Each structure stands twice: as C-alpha cells, then as structure tokens.
Amino acid sequence: MRMNEDARFGDDGVLIIVDVQNDFCPGGALAVPQGDEIIPIVNGLAARFRNVVLTQDWHPRGHLSFASSHPGKKPFDTVAMEYGPQVLWPDHCMHDTPGAEFHPALRAPHAALVVRKGFRRTIDSYSAFYENDRKTPTGLTGYLRERGLTRLFLAGLAFDFCVRYSAEDARRQGFDAFVIEDACRGIEIDGSVAATRQSLAALGVPCIKTQEFA
C-alpha cells in the first residue's frame, strides 16, 4: 500500500523503533541474524518522522526468562510460567550493561520516549504495550493517545517476537499499525517468522517496505 506524505509525516504518525540494542546485534548475547543491517534503514526512517519512540529490553540479573535461571534448561527451550508458555533466552540486555545499550550507530536524537520492558524479574515483556502476562501495561497506550498519535509504524528487532507482539497489541488497542518489514530482522524459531506474517495479516496489520514511503 502507498500512503500520501501528509498521512505519513503528519502529527498523528509515530515511528516505534523496537530494541535496536547491542545484545540483539551481531556479537551480542542474543544476536538476531543480520540485525545490524537494519540500522541505516531505521536511521533514514527516523529522520523523516516528527515523532519517534524507542523501546529497550531492560532485564535484571536472574530474570526468569533466562535459561540460566532454570537448572537443566537451555536457551530456546520453552517452559510454563504463571502467565503461559515462555521461551527461555540466553542472558541478555541486563540493565546497566553494554549489551543493553542502544547500538552506537542508531540515530534518533529526537525520540521523545524510551519504553523499558522486561524489568520485572518474574515476567518477560515482548510488547511495547504489555508485559507477557497480557495484563500489566507499560503506559505507552496512554502516551500515544494523549498526543494524538494514531498511526504507528514499527521497525526493529526482532520481527517475530518484540515487533510482532508490539504490532498486535497496537492494533488491539485501536491504533492503525504498520510493520516496515525491511527495517526488521527475525530470529526464526520453529516457523516463527511465517507465523508472524499470518498473525499480522489476520489482525489487519500490513507489512510494508520502505520504498512505499517514496
């Protein structure tokens, strides 16, 4: 779909840059394949949006989503938590560590908000809107509505987890949501990329390309 410039860049649009952090880029503790390749694309997009929000994984040590917190388990195993199934991850994005910092090449100096997620030890958080218990809000919905930001464009890492959950919740909260797919990269666990495309399509969330901003 092609959108006119006034709709794209008007005061009702916001670019949400999801988790472009060192640990999700090559060399990081939970590297998304080719994750750093999106950074020039994301930077170009950020320069064209008046409104930008960043999200940041921000875990304490010993977070229960870490495989190291479950004796006998390994990364990418799945366990049952009180709130449902939970993929176990390598220790990553622990607050106040270099891995949790935004990638140094990321350029979004006018971002007005950083949403930190996953800082509660017992609940993981993929979405920019809710923790994984699906009940604990981050406050992003109120922030966006207060400012009249109704058209949400999502980019970042990883397409099949934090971008997916954020886009799904954005749509469920009544926002117009778009995923800029070439400004994302996926982890790919057991068909998770294909499942993401199917889920987004079912919710009416288009996956678009940056050339559609031409």
Image: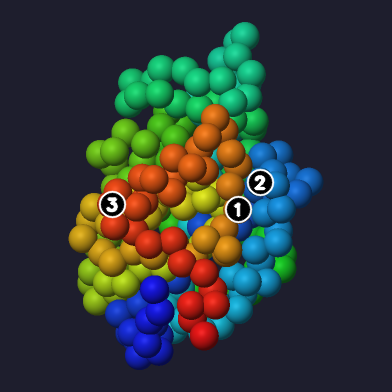
Q: Residue at x 57, y 58 (%)?
A: 184
The residue mark sitting in front, 1 or 3, is 3
> Residue at label 2?
32
Quarter containing the N terminus: bottom left
User: Is the C-beta separation of discs 1 and 2 under 8 Å?
Assistant: yes
**Looking at the picture, does residue 36 appear above or below residue 118?**
below
Q: Quick one: label 1, few (<14), some, or many (20+) residues within 10 Å?
A: many
**Could you tell me residue 63's position as x and y percent?**
53, 29
First reached walking from the N terminus: tag 1 or tag 3 = 1
> Residue at label 1?
185
**Could you tell me residue 155's position as x and y percent?**
51, 62
Horizontal side of 186 relative to 28 (left or right) equals left
Give the CA separation, mark 1 to mark 2: 7 Å
Type of amino acid under label 3: Leu
Q: Residue at x 57, y 64 (%)?
A: 183
Type of amino acid under label 2: Val
